[in-house]
Image (spheres, grey):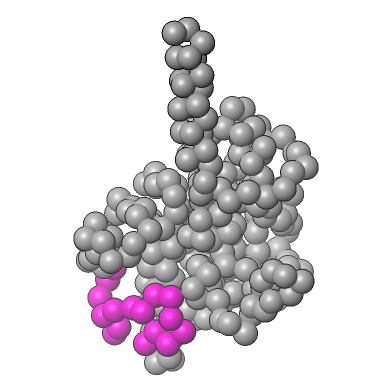
Amino acid sequence: MNKKDVRLRLGEKCQADEDRCTEFKMHHKISLREISAKCQKWENGRISRTMQPISKTICAFLNTVGGVIYVGIGDNKGIYGKHFNDDMMDHFLLAVYSCVSRFNPPVPEGCIKVGFAEVDEYNGNHGSDVSEMVLTPELNHNSHESSDDYYKAMVEFQQLVPKRKVGYHVIGKMQCPCVCDRLNDEKLYVAMIKVTKPPGNTVYQNDEGLSYYRRNGSNKMMTLDKVNTFINTVHIVEQQNTTFPSMLLSAIGRLIQVIQKMFLSKVFR
């Protein structure tokens, strides 16, 4: 992600709009487990959230054409930034890694990148780049965080994170030391999560086991017909249908193949 010529000033309006490849967020809650219970309520027979985890948009970008999520830019396109210090940047990066590691199937290495652009600190030097942090460890996608593979992956990742004032992070909790013990070294940044669509027509599920795709500036849950269309064609065709749990799709596909083989064996016996 090229950061040259980036100029962010507090309160200015972003020239881009939210669309198929662009999303603005004013919170940095990556996964559902980071969303407070106060932001969720039971309404009309279903759970309604006033705050959506960023993992939905990451999943939607993976299943469409990719895109960039800007954390610190409001829906009105205003540049406000979010307060980060070095430890909080590490926490944010680790939260993204931890969440994406629970996606299914495995997301290829290098498809998710995270960077930070400082707000209101533009010095006119177009030759200076904002440092970019890349998710380099091989991602583990088992659903059980207690597995040995997941633990090894997390240890490997922690070794890549520079050890500063806070030597560890509590991911998914509201009381991580890097957030509670705030220091005076915080600055305003816009965090950027760049999602590159992997080759092929793989359908990805997020950490909730749900599949989404991008339509204009919003995320839509995939229907059974849409998943079938997506797998067999390059472009997604809009269809009206009821939603279906995406985690059952692979099992249904295998069942159909078994039924077809049984039918053919009886016909040609």
Query: What residue is rendered at 42% in x and 87% in y?
Result: 175
Q: Where 260 falls versus 209 (above or below)?
A: above
Q: Main secondary structure of the magenta part?
A: loop
Q: Where is residue 213 in the image (x, y as percent from the top left)?
A: 63, 47
Relative to 129, is 164 above or below? below
The quarter of the picture where the C terminus appears is top left
The residue lying toward the viewer, choosing from 6 and 34, is 34
Point 28% across, 66% down: residue: 146
Magenta part of the chain:
161-177
Residue 235 found in image quarter:
top right
For residue 176, above or below residue 5: below
Regarding residue 67, the answer to whether it shows in the image is no
Residue 120 included in the magenta stretch of the image: no
> Can you give x and y, in whole percent of width and height, for residue 117 in the image?
52, 66
Give x and y (percent) for residue 224. Answer: 64, 41
Query: Which residue is located at x 51 percent, y 56 percent?
Result: 209
Position of 162 with respect to 123 (left or right) is left
